[in-house]
Image (spheres, rainbow, N blue to C red):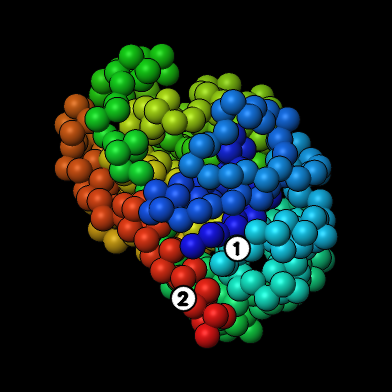
Amino acid sequence: MRVAIVTETWPPEINGVALTVQSLARGLAALGHTVELVRPGQHTDDPAESDPSFEQVLLPGASLPRYPGLRFGLPARHALQRRWLAQRPNVLYIATEGPLGLTALGAGRRLGIPACTGFHTRFDDFARHYGLGFLTPIVFAYLRRFHNRASATLVPTDELMSFLLANRFRNVRRLRRGVDTGLFHPGRRDDALRTQWGLAPTDLAVLHVGRIAPEKNLELAIEAFRSIQQAQPRARFVIVGDGPARTSLAERNSDIVFTGVKRGEDLARHYACGDLFLFPSLTETFGNVTLESLASGVPVVAFDYGAAHEHLLDPRAGTRVAMADRDAFIAAATAFATRIAQQPPTGASPLRAQAREAVANLDLASVASHFADLLAELSLRRAA
């Protein structure tokens, strides 16, 4: 097939959508499909460093308010229609619901090209965290209208699929998420890095990876760490990432280690050096970092939805907490930290092994193959 993927976020931007779309694009290319990637140009774009496995079409974009490191694409319906008239894709995958994604969906409908969309982000929840709660029902109605114009909407969990179907979304299909278990691996644990964090071999490293922003609920993670710290005074909290809330959190918590953004093998090394991962967010559609932490052998405490609900099934791999129960989250984190303290300090404890086992079968190749099958089904149905 020839597949056009339209996205308004792409690495080096650090977020779950960008990394998921990149994985899907590379997976399709590895299976022998021709991939055309349509996205806004970035200030860091270097033609010499572009991925040779697929063609990239760079269009105008602008910075996202309150998120200067992220961009959205400007409307491009006529440009896309001309391009797809000259070289027609078999099917479109539209990963984001911004102006570029909306006009790509319109162009595809006008040309009769089947399109599926990805429901990656709960923008209706984001509105509340930025003082725009009154817009929540309007944003949700827009998302429903957007996705219902596509031939199918792909979601990562059965839970989210049921929620959307109950709220009048149509043609919702599940495409599970995978994780690079070769990159994220317990074997990348690095005692020298833990020493830089101020930790002895028996000390506890509490970890969080992600964007440091209001919607991530990091104040709760810090509360949980303070509770852990009462029992284990030498524990350290390490936050990997960056974002608009970093400065204020760092000013109020001078003992927390803020590493900044990490990528690739360096990111994998940071994961593997942790002992317990705290994920207090309530606004994710999935939470890729949960899988990355488990693959790295680091147990997770998270609310019971998304990736945690789907894959955090063994209590030795972590704890799922009832949604929005702050006290239960703190208690669960403190209790699991005590369990970890009773394990061997070598990084080869049974808890770490069970965390790894929880995601051992989520390989990226099988996810890409399933994605290709879904796209082929849409293409064949339109042809029929």
Q: Amino acid at mark 1?
A: Pro
How far apart are the alpha carbons under marks 2 and 1?
14 Å
Work out whether mark 2 precedes mark 1 in sequence or the reverse, and give the earlier one.
1
Nearer-the-camera pick, 250 or 252: 250
Where residue 205 appears, as percent x and y from the top left, is 37, 29
Q: Residue at x 24, y 30 (%)?
A: 187
Identity of the residue furthest to the front in this view: 86
Where residue 310 appears, as percent x and y from the top left, is 37, 64
Is 269 situated left or right of 238 in this image?
left
Residue occupied by mark 2: 377
Residue occupied by mark 1: 89
Number of marks in the rendered image: 2
Can you see residue 229?
no
Q: Residue at x 72, y 72 (%)?
A: 111
Where residue 95 appears, as percent x and y from the top left, is 61, 58
Vertical relation: 166 (above or below) 181: below
Is 341 situated left or right of 128 in this image?
left
Nearer-the-camera pick, 52 or 14: 52
Instruction: Locate residue 108: give its quadrant.
Output: bottom right
